[in-house]
Image (cartoon, grey):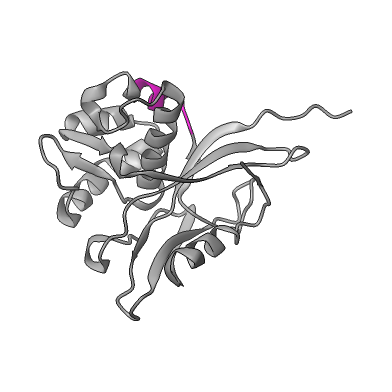
């Protein structure tokens, strides 16, 4: 009997914004995975990825995030990974300046992306350093758990993935960026929250929901 692969902890974010084109619609931010990626290439996905050790280092530094009170280390690491992966893949950063209740504005987020995103993706810096050097704290309190999916047994790669979504934003505050070569970016329209759930089902692999 083939050995069952242990699922890897992972996170993703459903970024939603009000549609500028049609009333009573929201837009869902999704990406197409590059054809050279060995897992699920060409699939339409939400930004996200695996939890790593650097995420766990951040949760040991409570001055680097807001929210998460009462959550254990595993629950916090899923949230940190969701924000980090979204920044790495899209340049969108759910964070606040220290001592501020407002999320980063588009201009400041663009500056941070230009200065640090490539180095972060190339392993030349860490997300912890990006936050500390720029006086930021992650907005973990913005993330609401939406779904928990586990890749079925028998797959060569398996993920134990939590899906989160932040509050719906006006069109002007949800910045869509051009991204790096591994991904292409797009915005799919969805009708309210039910359609957002339908967008989640467009993932090519079929996980097990819990």
Q: In the image, is 191 to the left or to the right of 167? A: right
Which image quarter is the N terminus in? top right
Q: Residue at x 13, y 35 (%)?
A: 98
Q: Is residue 128 above or below residue 103?
A: above
Q: Residue at x 38, y 69 (%)?
A: 26
- Tell me if residue 131 can be seen: yes
**Furthest-top residue in view?**
60
Residue 53 in sight from this viewpoint = no
> Does 117 sit left or right of 210 as displayed?
left
Q: Of residues 105 and 41, which is closer to you in this image?
A: 105
Query: Would you identify the image quadrant in which residue 168 lies?
Result: bottom left
Q: Is residue 133 above or below residue 172?
A: above
Residue 56 on the magenta segment? yes
Q: What residue is at 17 percent from the left and 35 percent from the top?
A: 134
Q: Would you identify the image quadrant in which residue 209 lies?
A: top right
Taking the spot 32% from the left edge, 62% from the top edge, the residue there is 176
Q: Is residue 98 magenta?
A: no
Magenta: predominant secondary structure element?
helix
Q: Position of residue 140 (x, y in %)?
A: 31, 37
What is the x, y in percent for residue 21? 33, 80
Residue 13 is left or right of residue 176, and the answer is: right
Residue at the bottom extreme of this rendering: 22
Toward which corner of the image does residue 17 lie, by quadrant? Answer: bottom left
| Nearer the observer, 83 or 145 | 145
Across the whole image, how many numbered discs are drawn on residues? 0
Question: Magenta region: which residues?
Answer: 51-57
Q: Nearer the viewer, residue 118 or 10?
A: 10
Name the residue furthest right.
1
């Amino acid at each position: 009997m083939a050995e069952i692969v242990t699922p890897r902890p992972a996170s993703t974010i459903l970024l939603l914004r009000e549609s500028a084109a049609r009333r009573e619609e929201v837009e869902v931010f999704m990406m197409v995975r590059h054809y050279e990626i060995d897992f699920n290439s060409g699939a339409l996905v939400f930004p996200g990825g695996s939890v790593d050790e650097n995420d766990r280092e951040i949760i040991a530094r409570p001055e680097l995030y807001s929210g998460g009170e009462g959550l254990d280390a595993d629950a916090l690491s899923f949230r940190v990974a969701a924000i980090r992966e979204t920044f790495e893949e899209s340049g969108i950063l759910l964070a606040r300046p220290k001592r501020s209740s407002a999320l980063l504005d588009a201009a400041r987020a663009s500056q941070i992306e230009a200065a640090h995103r490539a180095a972060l993706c190339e392993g030349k810096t860490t997300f912890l350093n990006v936050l500390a050097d720029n006086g930021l704290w992650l907005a973990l309190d913005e993330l609401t758990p939406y779904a928990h999916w586990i890749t079925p047994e028998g797959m060569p790669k398996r993920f134990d993935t939590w899906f989160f979504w932040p509050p719906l934003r006006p069109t002007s505050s949800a910045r869509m960026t051009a991204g790096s070569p591994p991904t292409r970016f797009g915005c799919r329209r969805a009708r309210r929250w039910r359609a957002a759930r339908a967008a989640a089902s467009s993932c090519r692999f079929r996980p097990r929901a819990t």
